[in-house]
Image (cartoon, helix red, strand yellow):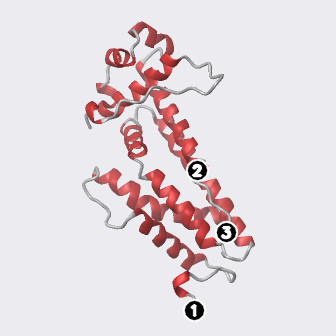
């Protein structure tokens, strides 16, 4: 991916009362662009400073080294993803509806090109920044996984699911989504496309999950109900 293919970020908007120096935010935005396009080793500090509209000396007052800047870029991306993950919430309602909405939201998140690009960057540098890579992965997995485990627990209490190990069940459901929309593109470099739509991937995962964990109070699918 070339630098020209990555859209230049819009000027940062700051909530009222936010005291963060806008120059630091601009440096982070441009650094993300350069790191995603060029990788850690090939990225140089001077072009980042120039594109961010600051001097190299000013950049170094915010980030004392390229490694520190890279760490800040990944931390910033992780914070952004965490805010997106807050939207991946199960909603109240029957199990099929609740799980389907969760899966559709999770698929949309995992298929986001920026999410994929940042994960690729972290994976490429995992030997150099092993602790950072592990934290980045575990933070996202845990944040979403807790939401799904809570939903599975509630549905089990209602008798719509029968599940002795909710964390295992959550991992199985998320794995059915991650494989086609995240890991296949990650491994193949987007050269192999999945034929199913994101909506179909979510629907298939939910039906497979319910076939395994259906409880006595589970509502039948609409096309299985008789009038």
Marks 1 and 2 sit apart, C-alpha to C-alpha, by 35 Å
Residue drawn at x 38%, y 65% as measured from the top left: 197
Q: What x and y, as percent, mark residue 109?
A: 48, 51
Residue identified by numbered label 1: 226
Image: 58 above or below 66: above
Which numbered circle lies on residue 87?
A: 2
Q: Secondary structure at mark 1?
A: loop
- 158 or 212, which lies in front? 158
- Local packing at callout 3 (Cα closer than 10 Å; few below 14, some 14-19, many 20+) is few
Residue 100, percent from left and from top: 54, 67
Q: Earlier in the sequence, mark 2 or mark 3?
A: 2
Circles 3, 1 touching at the beta carbon (< 8 Å):
no
Q: CA distance from mark 2 to mark 3?
A: 17 Å
| Residue 16: % across, % down | 64, 25
Q: Residue at 50% of width from left, 75% of height from top?
A: 208
The CA span between labels 3 and 1 is: 21 Å
Q: Quadrant of residue 82?
A: top right
Q: Earlier in the sequence, mark 1 or mark 2?
A: 2
Which residue carries the number 3 mark?
93
Q: Secondary structure at mark 2?
A: loop
Q: Is residue 108 left or right of residue 95?
A: left
Circles 2 and 3: CB atoms closer than 8 Å: no
């Amino acid at each position: 991916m070339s630098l020209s293919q990555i859209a230049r970020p819009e000027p940062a908007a700051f909530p009222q009362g936010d005291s963060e120096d806008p120059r630091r935010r601009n440096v982070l935005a441009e650094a993300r662009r350069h790191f995603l396009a060029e990788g850690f080793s090939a990225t140089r500090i001077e072009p980042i400073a120039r594109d961010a509209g600051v001097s190299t000396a000013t950049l170094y007052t915010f980030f004392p080294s390229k490694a520190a800047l890279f760490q800040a870029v990944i931390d910033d991306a992780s914070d952004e993803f965490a805010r997106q993950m807050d939207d991946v919430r199960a909603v109240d309602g029957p199990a099929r509806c609740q799980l389907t909405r969760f899966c559709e939201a999770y698929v949309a998140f995992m298929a986001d090109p920026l999410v994929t690009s940042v994960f690729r960057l972290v994976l490429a540098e995992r030997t150099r920044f092993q602790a950072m890579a592990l934290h980045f992965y575990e933070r996202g997995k845990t944040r979403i996984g807790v939401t799904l485990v809570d939903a599975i627990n509630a549905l089990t209490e209602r008798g719509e699911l029968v599940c002795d190990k909710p964390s295992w069940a959550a991992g199985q459901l998320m794995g059915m989504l991650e494989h086609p929309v995240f890991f296949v593109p990650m491994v193949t470099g987007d050269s192999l496309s999945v034929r199913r739509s994101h909506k179909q991937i979510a629907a298939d995962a939910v039906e497979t999950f319910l076939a395994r964990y259906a409880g006595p109070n589970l509502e039948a699918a609409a096309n299985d109900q008789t009038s």
